[in-house]
Image (cartoon, rainbow, N blue to C red):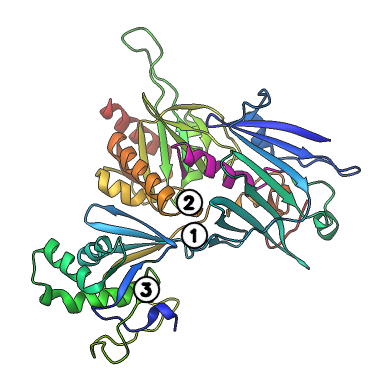
Amino acid sequence: MSVSTSYRIAELVLRVEQQRRDGVAPGILPPAFAPFATVVPVGEADVTLQAVSEPPEQPRPDPGSPRCETTQWIAYRSEDRPVFLFKSVLPGLPIWRSAVRERGAARWRVSTAPEFLSLAGAEREPAALAFPLGELVFLDAFTERGGLVFHSCGIRDAGEGRGPDGQPGQRRGMIFTGHSGRGKSTIGALWIAQGATLLCDDRIAVRPTPEGHRLCGTPWHGDLRQVSPESGPLHALFFLEHAEQTQIERISAEDAQRRMLTTVWQPVWTGQAGLGALWERCARLAREVPMFRLRFRPEPATIDRLRGAMAELA
Amino acid sequence: MSAEAKSTSSGARVRHAPSVAWQRVGDEVVVLDVPRRTLVGLNGTASALWEALAAESDLAAGASAVAERLQQPTAGILDEVEQIAQALIRRELLQVVATLPVGTAPAHAAAPSPASAGEAPDALAGILWEEQLEACGVYAACAKDEFGEGGPQCTSSPSAGSS
């Protein structure tokens, strides 16, 4: 018996089919996932994860496969499909979970070691999309479909006034990107206080469309727990730095492209083909969306300055 | 010393390491060293050499391509090209596919040792800057929501195992 749940994140539908084990409570995800829950007919998900209790797979890496290892996971390619292994410090269980994508299909098999629960003293099955697997699978699928994911905070400002057609003013979509400690959550909190909608303060997805780029909220937040599945047109991207005085400086597309390489999440397991295409999309984004360096002091006046900069762009 | 870090000379055949990805950004080629999750920016000569070596090639041919691109005599840049190649091999961004027979390498092509951890990037010819990438799937959210440290989303964190 299995339980199915689906999440729509940046228009990408992830469906989880989790095997139930007698006497074991099903895994649950953080509350930030709740706004992204959706219902889709079987077969209409973009990505399906089949989660089972079995020894993790560790298929042989392809010769010359890019291999990346962090403190928590290992990524490589096997038979030209991505493989993720998840590390643990539990005695005798160096790998507690694997996720292997089927060849030529948007379907993953997620294998969790049966002894994980007893070794870890856990009371419930780890959710199939539990961190960090969900984020990695999303990054793989979303970037393969032409998207970008930034280490960033994203907001949609409240529309002001009315346009010439009498419709409410346009809501400005902005991304504030930077490494940890650069002020993503700080600027997000300032925007919330000024009535804007915070989409997420740590991971923002960008989707190219024929009408332009759109920014989309994700559930992978930072200090601020507020997230939103909303999306909207992207009007500007800012590279964050803390400073004594707020300064907003328009930068060239080339400068922005170079800066983006360090704040866009890179699906490193895709190698030159995948990363080259992703970097080309960064270049296009830098050409089509105004890019700024934002040195800011954490005070409400910074938001006024940003709104002024956006008004000048209009 | 790695096999790839053997002496280089203009006759050595080299190629990009399979574990890198790269892109030209303006005047620079930026190389992503996947295993180390590090971006490396190359200077003008190194960028030209990198692009010339996009297909496996010997260094002499690479130097000629660089000279043509920079509109300089090949002889005038050969030393610099060899120094850059050695630096990129030490940094494991380039691989040596084949070397000249023993004893035929020029005296100035000293065998490099692998770059040591923490070595300043400016110690390596051709490398302008390096920046370590943060890794997705590794961040502090585990300690930032009500699930707290050790929540189900943190089952692989070194300090927790589970639930």
Q: Is residue A238 magenta?
A: no
- Whether callout 3 and callout 2 share a subunit is answered no
- Whether callout 1 and callout 2 share a subunit is answered yes
Label 1, label 2: how far apart the Cα atoms are: 7 Å
Of residues A293 and B157, the one nearer the viewer is B157
Q: Which residues are magenta?
A: A128-150
Q: Which residue is mark 2?
A: A270
Q: Is residue B119 left or right of residue A94?
A: left
Q: Amino acid at mark 1?
A: Pro
Of residues A120 and B77, the one nearer the viewer is B77
Q: Residue at coordinates 25% horizontally, 58% vertically from top-left?
A: B28
Q: Quadrant of residue B113?
A: bottom left
Q: Which residue is mark 3?
A: B97
Rendered position, B21 above or below A168 = below
- Name the chain under label 2: A
Q: Secondary structure at mark 2?
A: helix
Q: Which residue is mark 1?
A: A66
Q: Amino acid at mark 2?
A: Thr
| Mark 3 surroundings within 10 Å by alpha-carbon count, few (fewer than 14), some (14 through 19), many (20 or more) | some
Find out whether the residues at labels 1 and 2 contact each other: C-beta distance under 8 Å: yes
Rendered position, A165 above or below A193 = above
Q: Residue at coordinates 8% horizontally, 64% vertically from top-left?
A: B71
Q: Position of residue A168 (x, y in %)?
A: 41, 13
Q: Quadrant for the N terminus of chain B, please.
A: bottom left
Q: Secondary structure at mark 3?
A: strand
Q: Is residue A137 magenta?
A: yes
Label 3, label 1: how far apart the Cα atoms are: 18 Å
